Image (cartoon, helix red, strand yellow):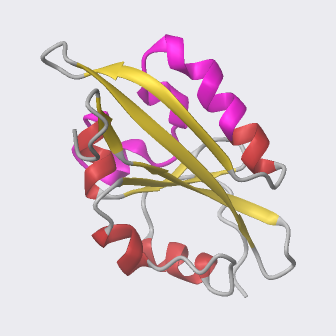
Amino acid sequence: MRLPRQAYAGYDEEWLIDDLAGCTPVVTLGFLRRSPHAVKLVDRNGSILYLNENAMAFYGVEAVDEAVGKLWWDLVRPQLRHTLRNVVTRAGLGENVRVTVDRQDAQGRDFSTEIVATPVRCRAMSVSKLLVVSPIISTDGKIGG
């Protein structure tokens, strides 16, 4: 068994695959990559472990290395930070959390994003990280806004 990564020196796919082995719910790198939604893995402190391509585009990140180790709420406008901290705290305690936040795109159009945070439990069944999925919901209620 590998020791937990102490410092986020950058994205390490091998470490991520090994760390997800045996977790519940089952999370695979293939799922993370192919999801049509913005998918993030964060630790219980809110530090980013992984972003898929949709999440990178959503947050304006060019490469996953740019975000790994940063706090999730540091990638959003200040008005949302309290909400995201609350999501991380609640999910870190084992709760499945679902919230909707209002945002604006680069053209100033309003849209909503639903955030669903699911605790990921390790082999000992303690919460080790959070799977956060954010489909974009337009003002007319369609996913993919």
Q: Where does the N terminus fall, quadrant-wise?
A: bottom right
Q: Within the image, what quadrant is residue 127 found in? A: bottom right
The total of numbered circles placed on residues is 0
Residue most extreme to the front:
140
Note whether 111 is above or below 59 in the view shown: above
Query: How far across and how far down the image is residue 142, in percent?
Result: 26, 42
Query: How far across and how far down the image is residue 71, in percent?
Result: 56, 35
Q: Is residue 9 visible?
A: no
Query: How far across and how far down the image is residue 47, in percent?
Result: 59, 44
> Is residue 70 on the magenta stretch?
yes
Q: Within the image, what quadrant is residue 21 found in? A: bottom right
Note whether 76 is above or below 31 in the view shown: above
Observer-nearest residue: 74 or 26? 26
User: Left of 31 or right of it: where is 97?
Assistant: right
> Is residue 62 on the magenta stretch?
yes
Residue at point 58% right, 83% down? 18
Residue at point 48% right, 26% down? 101
Observer-nearest residue: 126 or 67? 126
Query: How far across and how far down the image is residue 4, in percent?
Result: 71, 68
**Main secondary structure of the magenta stretch:** helix
Note whether 71 is above or below 130 in the view shown: above
Q: Within the image, what quadrant is residue 86 found in? A: top right
Residue range of the region highlighted in magenta in the rendering: 59-87
Residue at point 59% right, 81% down? 26
Q: Where does the C terminus fall, quadrant-wise?
A: top left
Note whether 48 is above or below 138 in the view shown: below
Residue at point 33% right, 55% down? 37
